[in-house]
Image (cartoon, rainbow, N blue to C red):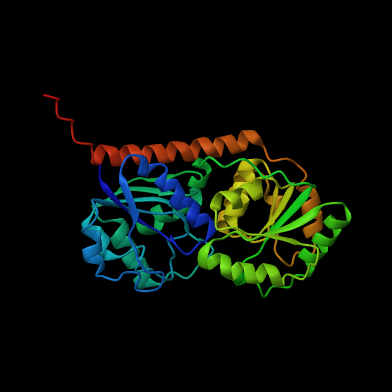
Amino acid sequence: MARIGLVGFFGWGNYGDELFLDNWKNSIGLHHEVSVVHDQLSAPYFSRQATEVAKEFDALVIGGGDLVIPNKISPLYWNRAWLQRPIYISGVGVPTWIKHHAPDVMERLRHFFQHPNVRHIGARDRESAEWIRRHLEPTVPVEDHADLVFNMTMPPATVFENPTVGINLRTHRADSDPTQLVNVCREMRSRGYDVVNIVLGTGRTRAADLDVARQFPFEDQIVLESENMHDLSSYLGGLDLLLSNKFHGTVVATMYGVSSVVLSATTKSRNLYSRLDRRALLSTNEDPDMLAKADLARVPVSRLAVQELEAEANTAVRALVRRIDNDFPAPAQRPVP
């Protein structure tokens, strides 16, 4: 059993990242000892030198999320200290909408991805994989696959008393004009739907997003929150419709077969909805056509398309675990005397 260090945006309580952490624990963690490498939630992220932290592990898994950013670099994700150990990069994405490529950042990323200790690279979508191949030119193949959260088994959906529409907000979009979303909520309420505002975060993120949810100017909303990740996923599964500012809110809703109107149409959302042939449901918080898109979302999610994504993510996770197992085989059991 190897000691595997997990490198990612873990501990801040962001819904998608904490799902990734659970995913690693329930896959790699079934075969090896896993733990998060950082012990602080602010820079420099470590109470000791990173070179000393790296020595505590046999290998490191970096991912997932938008960690490959061309105009800034994190000392948590792409720390040179990690290169003294075998590295498996998995589930990462690239925000390809960022067009400024800082020369020093790109040089640092190329050095990292081209290092001989990088054993595996898996990207969350084809576009991210192509960007990594073209701009970073790693020496190992770059695989592309569905977001690895699609590998997870979700808890049973909440059974709401009435038909229910869900929304979720986030702090860095709190200054957008809420008029269009409020109008949709009012219309849905007039049609007999309950409107729930799901705070998709735990810990620090939950505290910040809860303030934003409570300030949302729709009096009939029901705010749902929890420190339990399963509760949050279960809430999403019980909805009839979601209007989401969070990518993994959309991902998990999709896994349950719940239609989601995307209010934060980032690169990853566009890539996912292109695969699902649902680009017409890409929107913004201030979109005057939001209600029409909410009505269009009555078209059900293709279960076959979702099963494809789930199978792809499952294959990618199993391949990663198999690669780590092959590099760090369990010691042969001694014969019983």
Q: Furthest-right residue in view?
A: 190
| Residue 212: % across, % down | 65, 70
- The answer to whether residue 153 shows anywhere in this view is yes
Q: Quadrant of residue 106?
A: bottom left
Residue occupying the point 24% across, 41% down: 327
| Residue 67: % across, % down | 43, 61
| Residue 220: % across, % down | 80, 63
| Residue 336: % across, % down | 14, 25
Task: Judge by depth and name the residue closer to the eye, 275 or 216.
Answer: 216
- The answer to whether residue 147 shows anywhere in this view is no
Q: Quadrant of residue 56?
A: bottom left
Task: Judge by depth and name the residue closer to the eye, 229 or 259.
Answer: 229
Task: Judge by depth and name the residue closer to the eye, 308 or 61.
Answer: 61
Task: Judge by depth and name the residue closer to the eye, 166 or 183.
Answer: 166
* 97 shown above or below 235: below
Residue occupying the point 45% across, 49% down: 22
